[in-house]
Each structure stands twice: as C-alpha cells, then as structure tokens.
Amino acid sequence: MEQLNAISEKFSSLAWGIPLIVLLIGGGLYLLIVSRFLPFRFFGHAIQILRGKYDDPNDPGEISHFKALTTALSSTIGMGNIAGVALAISVGGPGAMFWMWISAIVGMSTKFFTSTLAIMYRGKDSNGDLQGGPMYFIREGLGKNWKFLAVMFSVFGMLGALPVVNVNQLKQAINDIILIPNGVEVSLSSNLIIAAVLVILTTFVILGGLKRISSIAAKMVPSMVILYFILVLIILGINYTEVPKYFLMIFTDAFEANFINGDAVFGGVLGAIILLGIKRGAFSNEAGIGTAPMAHGAAKTNEPVREGLVAMLGPVIDTLIVCTLTALAILVTGVWQTSSDSGVTLTASAFQDAMPGYGQYLLMVCVFIFSISSLFSYAYYGTKCMSFLIGADKKHYYNYLYILSIILAATTPFSTMINFIDGIFAFMAIPTMLSTIIMAPRVVKEIKGYRKRMKEDSA
C-alpha cells in the first residue's frame, strides 16, 4: 500500500507541473479578457436565466437550466468543499484558500466558455441522441483531425468520474464520527459493509439515467447547501471575535511560504502554496476539467450563451461560498493548529469544537448528502465518456467499473485516492482547455449575436 501511495503521489506531482498551471490559470485569464469580463457583467442576467425566465419546453435538450446547474453542482459540491479545503489548510495554511478563490474567479470564465461550447457543438451518440461535453464539442467544432483530444478526454474522463475520493472520505467520516466513538471496531469488514450500502443506493439512482439523477440533484443540492450554510454560520457566530483576524490572514498568508506540516513534497515555497490552492480549487469546482459541460450540454436551450452564463455560477456557489465557509470554520475554531487530522476528520473536529456533543453528527448529515449526490452525477459523466468511445448501447458496462471503484475506495488510504484523481483531472484539463482556447473566438462571436438578439427582443 505504501508503494501504491508513492506511485500515486509521483503521478500527481508530474501531472501538475507549470505547463498545466499556465494552461488552467493563464488560459482562464485569456478567456476572461477576450470576453471583456462578461461573467461579471452578466451576473444578474445569469440569475434570471436560472430562475426560469427564458425556459422554453420546446427547446432541444433533456433538462432545465436549473437542473443542469444542480446536476453539475451535485458533483462539485462534495468532498472538495469539506475534505479538499481541510487538506489545503492543514498543509498550506490559511493562504491556500486565497489561491482557491483566484482559481474560482478565473474558473467562472472557463466554465462559461466550456459550457457555451457544449451547447454550440452538441453532437449525436451512436443511438442518435443529442449529447454535449468536451468530447462532442472537440469532434463537432474542430473536426476529425482533432479527434485524438476527444478520445483522450473520454479515456481520462472515465477514470476521473470514479467516485473514489467521495467514497473514501464518506467512509472516513462514518468511521471517525459514528463507529469509533461508539466503540465499534473499524476493520476491512466494516468498510466493505459501508461500500455495499453505497453500491445499492447508487445503483438504484444511476440506472434511472439523467432525468432521475437531475431530479434528485435538484431536490438535494439546494437543501444541502442551505443546511451547511446555517451550520457554519452558527460556528462563525460562536467564534465571531476570531472571524476578522482569520479572514485577513487568508490574504496575508497567501504570499508567505508557511507550510503547516513542513511537507518536503511541497518544499515550503510560495509557488507551492499557489499550486496547492489551484489544485484544490480545480478539485473543488472542476473549472476547466470538463465534467460540468457534460451536464450543461443536456440543458433545454437553443441559446448557448444562456447555458454558459448559468454554468459560470457554479464556481461562485461551490468555491467562493461553500469552500470559504469550510475554511473559516476550520480557522476560527483553531483546530488547524491543534490537530494533526486532515481531510474530513479535520472539518469534523471544527464542528465538534464549536458544538460539542452533536456538531460532528450534523456535519455527518451534510457529508452524507454531499457524497451521495456526487456519486449519482459522476456515474452519468462516466457513462457518457464510455458511450463516446465504444457506443451508447455499451455504456452500461461503465456501471460495473463504477461499483468496483466504490469498493476499492472504501478500503484504500485517502492520500492515494486524492493523488490519483488530481493526476487524472490534470489529463482531462489538457484537451478541454486546449480546444476551448482554440474555439474561444467563436464563443465571442456567439456572445455578440446573443446580445443583438436580446436587444431586438426587448425593443
């Protein structure tokens, strides 16, 4: 197991080199500039679209703008917001959160462009059904000569959609919050029982396809965000005198090489804190990775820009709001300095510190909902990737791999799983970002056309 962990760590560090950071952040900044900061100028309009003002049931697609966003959020609002933030702070200190913010702000433009392209260049699968996502907009938008990028995305997409981090941290939360405190011995058998329950729950939902997944996500995502929001506000209220100090520390520590655990892998340099924040930001909101466009590509609309605007709200909700809440809860309670825990266990310590006796159980409810909703949407992403590669009639075979990964994740160390997914996400980002940057001028032209149509409709 130690050898496996070392291999996954090396894989992650090789994948997340300077070229990828330039592609993700530099590419995102380029998209932000060429769109003339459209995500920020059209924020209010995006809210109107989300609320259903422009919905037309006769438009092509499968699900509404709202369901597309909640389906995408059900995968991004998960363990990246609880375990990922805790990992970033336990290793890189408060400053890592600042670079997660930068990743999210830049990610808004990336999400806008990738999801607009997902509607502009929807393609048909082998069954003749309309589909969206990076593999389709690469094939339809760039042609056969670029198909290798579509294949690359789909191969790594099948692996990146495996729910290994969510399952691993849900298992850890159940062990640390429920089983161990109540005297239950944690073993391979208990972990396999947890995996079996998750397999049954997941199988029931994913066999219902996108419509069942999106309907459940539309109910679960808003309620889980509100519940988590309220719980963290209680923690911040209890520790209100500490909030200004630590909020300021997020900014000041962002430019200091101050690694909490002195991890030799990160070297204790400023560049490493930036890398850590961007990596955890990418894991949290998945901007530029290419998963969200697969959900947004199924939206009922004939206006690509509208879905792009809805998609850009994802990093705002996911990283700027939910991740910031988690970071402040960990910081103001002081557990990041007094505990050697990491991941979901560190966040649980913060909840227990603020609300002794019941805080960790309330977090357990959130963790369970976050994880389960992520399990559903990731299964949809993986089947879409397999469908593109070997045909829609064979996509159900992915479910067997998916179920196997749940069992594997429940019996494997967290560090191995997070390093594996980090590396895979990097290889998903390469085809997604390259193709998006190449086709960016087409999106800019579409923006101008959309603005013109909006003015004509309002005249």
Image (cartoon, rainbow, N blue to C red):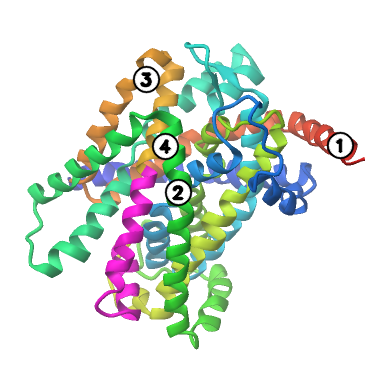
225, above or below 163, in the image: below
- Callout 2 secondary element: helix
- Disc 1: which residue: 457
The reply to whether callout 2 and callout 1 are in contact (CB within 8 Å) is no
Of 347 and 429, which appears nearest the observer? 347
Question: Magenta residues?
Answer: 345-374
Q: CA distance from mark 2 to mark 1?
A: 33 Å
Badge 1 or badge 4: first in the primary sequence: 4
Q: CA distance from mark 2 to mark 4?
A: 10 Å
Badge 2 or badge 3: first in the primary sequence: 2
Q: Is residue 323 visible?
A: yes
> Is residue 362 on the magenta stretch?
yes
Badge 2 or badge 4: first in the primary sequence: 4
Q: CA distance from mark 1 to mark 3?
A: 42 Å
The residue depicted at 36 percent of the width and 30 percent of the height is 208
- Callout 1 secondary element: helix
Pair 2/3: label in front:
2
